[in-house]
Image (cartoon, rainbow, N blue to C red):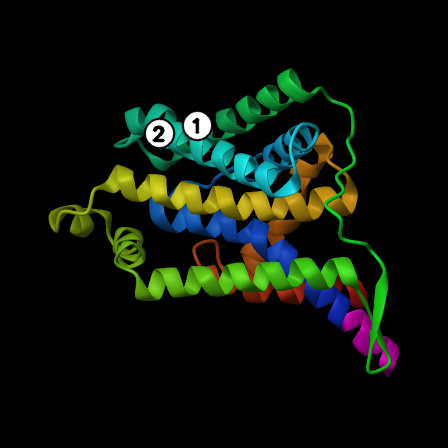
Amino acid sequence: MAFFFEVLINGLLVGIMYSLVALGFALIYKASDVFNFAQGDMSLLAGLALVGFLTVMPLWLALLCTVVVMIILAYGTVYIIFRPLLARPPLILFMAAIGLSFLVQGIGQAIWGTDAKGLNIGIPDVPIEVAGIFISTFDLTFGGVAAVLVAGLIWFFQKTRTGRALRAVSDDHEAALSVGIPLLRAWAVTWVIAGIVATVAGVAWGTRLGVQFSLSLIALKALPVLILGGIDSILGAILAGLLVGAGENLA
């Protein structure tokens, strides 16, 4: 029985990290009806950027600079790529997202090359014993970070004026515009949030698996999460991620 709970808990912690990737998809789709094909590549870019920054600066500053890179990418994506396509059909926006995926991968290859890179942020991957159950320190740490991030997002969308405005945009674009909510600015904020989520996911998976271009394929593991939880459901993405992670470990 202890072994069962050990596998289950570690699976749930991994599932939270799956939820982060799925959460990025859900946030952007809910706000802009764009299936962000580049979400996995954004996580990859965050991991590559952090590896690069760590060679010349301490961890806290490298993380800050990585977040700045993702914010710049988010604003550039909205105002340079999607702004001219604002009134186009969803298929055109989807094709633009595929193009963004190739662009992000190309930027990563041009700056950091294609070799796999190790990412060490000082969290040892050793088990700790709790009530006779061994839990990975790494998974527990990032599971906690992901849980805090998700709780912060729930508070942001429920309690802040900006969060409520973003919810209004996701519910009805035209109604939001009619009450003076700027659509592009709302999209930009949503992409920034998705970029921060991608940063946490990229750091977590990059530390766990190494920063390599196959890291972008982690988004494929988020697809079952999206199908189970609903592509536009933030809560569904979280719960489905836990279910997939637990099921994968128990299988």
In the image, residue 172 lies at what x, y percent?
Answer: 24, 53
Q: Secondary structure at mark 2?
A: helix
Residue 153 covered by magenta stretch: no
Q: Is residue 215 positioned above or below 143 on the image?
A: above
Report the amino acid beneath label 2: Phe
Q: Disc 1 marks which residue? A: 96
Q: Quadrant of the C terminus?
A: bottom right
Q: Residue at x 35, y 23 (%)?
A: 80
Residue 83 x %, y % = 30, 28
Q: Amino acid at mark 1?
A: Ala
Indicate which disc, 1 or 2, sits on the residue closer to the N terminus: 2
At a point 78% along the width and 24% down the height, the residue shown is 115
**Numbered circle sitting on residue 82:** 2
Most foreground residue, 174 or 149: 149
Label 2 CA crowd tier, 10 Å (few <14, some 14–19, many 20+): many
Magenta: main secondary structure equals helix
| Region of the chain picked out in magenta, as a range | 1-8
